């Protein structure tokens, strides 16, 4: 590493509530862009080891290929919610 990089200091601006809210829930590095598409930088969230382990466990429980298959697969022969409600209401009146 060059002396210039080693001796440089990092600016540490404070995030206001709006920025904190906008970045909440981000658990992996993301690009921050202007509305024109210009990249402003990359935000890498600071997660504790415990938080990172929880997110990794949750990620391992989902198979993206299986999720995509279910989205593209036919919806089956289900019934409309209105139809189910009408059937439930009619069975209540018979009791």
Image: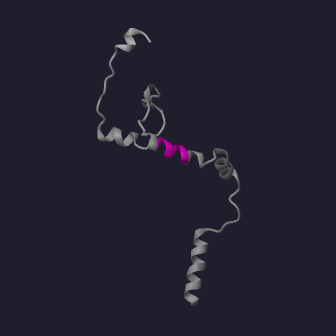
* Quadrant of res 65: top right
Q: Is residue 61 left or right of residue 30?
A: right
Residue at screen point 43% across, 39% down: 47
What residue do we see at 31% from left, 23% from top? 11
The tally of labels here is 0
The stretch in magenta equals 51-57
x, y percent for residue 22? 38, 41
- For the C terminus, the quadrant is bottom right
Residue drawn at the location 33% of the way across and 22% of the way down = 10
Q: Position of residue 5 (x, y in %)?
A: 39, 13
In this view, the residue farthest toward the bottom is 95
User: Quadrant location of the N terminus?
Assistant: top left
Tell me the residue at 67%/52% (across/down). 70
- Report the predominant secondary structure element of the magenta stretch: helix
Viewer-proximal residue among 5 and 84: 5
Q: Position of residue 28 (x, y in %)?
A: 49, 36
Decide: is 5 above or below 70. Answer: above
Looking at the image, residue 77 lies above or below residue 89:
above
Res 20 quadrant in image = top left
Asked whether 53 falls inside the magenta stretch, the response is yes
């Amino acid at each position: 590493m060059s002396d210039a990089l080693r001796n440089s200091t990092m600016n540490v601006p404070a995030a206001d509530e709006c920025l904190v809210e906008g970045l909440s829930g981000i658990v992996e590095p993301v690009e921050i862009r202007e509305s024109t598409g210009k990249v402003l930088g990359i935000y890498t969230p600071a997660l504790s080891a415990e938080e990172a382990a929880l997110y990794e466990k949750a990620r391992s429980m989902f198979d993206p290929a299986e999720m995509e298959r279910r989205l593209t697969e036919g919806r089956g022969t289900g019934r409309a919610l209105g139809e189910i409600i009408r059937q439930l209401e009619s069975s209540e009146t018979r009791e």
